[in-house]
Image: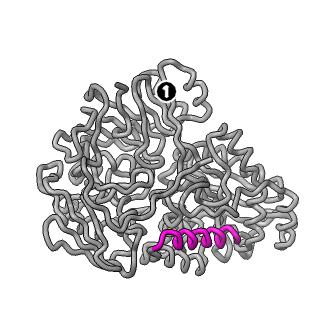
Amino acid sequence: MITRRALPVLLALPALAGRAHAQGGAAPGGRLTIAFGDPVSSIDPQLNNFGGDRSVDLHAFDLLVENRNGALRPGLAESWRLLDKTSWEFTLRRGVTWHDGRPFTADDVIFSYRRAPDVPGSAASFAGYLRDITGLEAPAPHRLIVRTGGPAPLLPLNLASVHIVARHAAEGATSADFNAGRAAIGTGPYRFVSYVPGDRITFRRNDVYWGGRPDWDEVVIRLVPNAAARTAALLAGDADVIERASVADAENLGRRQDVRVFAHPGLRVLILCPNPAPGPNAFLRAADGSALPDNPLRDPRVRRALSLALDRRGLADRLLQGQAVPAGQWMPEGSFGYEPSLPAPAPDADAARRLLAEAGLPDGFRLTLHVPTDRYVRGPETAQAVAQMWTRIGVRTTVENMPWATFSARAAAGEFAMPVLAWGNGTGEASYALVNVLGSYDPAAGRGSSNWGRYANPEVDRLLEAAVRELDDARREAILRESARVVMGETGIIPVFHYRNLWAARRGLTVSTLVSDRTAAMMVRRES
């Protein structure tokens, strides 16, 4: 059981003693090699809100506010306070410099927050985090005023997901300029050295980092999508740490004397996203293979039938070998916004068949389930198991696997009938998914950037707006719980399970989390 509570949002936070990034550990220095399971689309920290990209970003780029597993801490802002219902003041750190030696100022923050919502080529925009902002002012080089369209108590929490870039380096630059290093100038603990797409990223220590001297002289991130290959790299000494350790290997790794396994509760949920768009869909066919005049996924009885066909406990125990928790909603038990009345549904194939018959589909239909091959832990295997369960109730399901780069672009365009999404929660509370995954798709409003199923419900949008404006934590959580009841009442999405996070490291190293399922060199220290 996951028992993680989000910290109530702080409307004012004084400067804290010490530095948010202070490193530590025994005998710093040397090279650290980490094998990533998540793919990386770019070095541009504002291009895509993807897990692998965000883990990489932590090395070179900083945040105004930091979210350390639900607790807000100073980042590039030493403190912040609410001036009135729609105005926030942030006091920025003095003496911070970019990697090229130029001073960091509030003007860089203003540029960053104006750039991030609309970076060309983005498949998962950061606009949702900045949707409340209506104005940005810099009365002094280290003072920032943020104006919002209404009360925005979650603003500091949301800003903990948008990295700051240098105006002088990024203005007019493309994401390709970041990948080549021309624009990859940050204030973070490590300086960008090189990026070989699909292979590796190299960083070197920033000796004048404001947060203290980093532990490692050099950090190499190897991009290894195959879990078995990551394990092999660790055992061969080609990697010091691996993320998303294979659940099949975890037990054996834990018995070795030269390796340690680190497991932490996570906030990532694997979701099946039924697309209810009206009209025909190339990935939905009648039982006999002929075209369907309309989309059967528009009917909540059909979506409910698909949910009831799933043996979530079996999937978690057999495919994930106990390293996952069955899900009946997008938030795990114990988190802010979790609704206790929505446990994971028990499998009921007979009820599923009855629902299909009631929906006028006694013979079922045909469906294609789309999943990336190189991103989600046991994603393709889970999709195959789900396809078998759906086929047993008469929904003949085939699985189409494809690389993440192809999958994400097509899913973002709303092309698929049933894409698989493993959503990692960036804020630790329920409104994050409401803004990005469940709010009706509206890029101009900064809503639904990862709503790949194109789910839409005006009541959910109304509850979202009410939640993000509510200053009282208890009332906000009540609104979020109501939104969960609405979404799951019509099976707007089909949650499957919540992942646990697994890392493995060579003996002598310890791994502790920064945020949910990110991976960064700052998490890794030598044992004293």
Q: Quadrant of residue 227?
A: top right
Dot 1 corresponds to which residue?
A: 260
Q: Position of residue 87 (x, y in %)?
A: 30, 77
Instruction: Answer whether residue 443 is visible to the viewer in this image.
Output: no
Look at the numbered disc 1 and give the secondary structure of its residue: strand
Q: Residue at x 67, y 67 (%)?
A: 488
Above or below, 433 against 459 in this view is above
Q: Quadrant of residue 438?
A: bottom right
Count of picture labels:
1
Instruction: Answer whether residue 119 is visible to the viewer in this image.
Output: yes
Q: Residue at x 29, y 48 (%)?
A: 20
Q: Position of residue 387 (x, y in %)?
A: 73, 51
Q: Main secondary structure of the magenta part?
A: helix
Type of amino acid at the residue the image marks with label 1: Arg
Above or below, 163 against 489 in this view is above
Is disc 1 surrounded by few (<14), some (14 to 19) or many (20+) residues within 10 Å?
many
Point out the stretch of residues depicted in magenta: 472-490
Above or below, 112 against 463 in this view is above
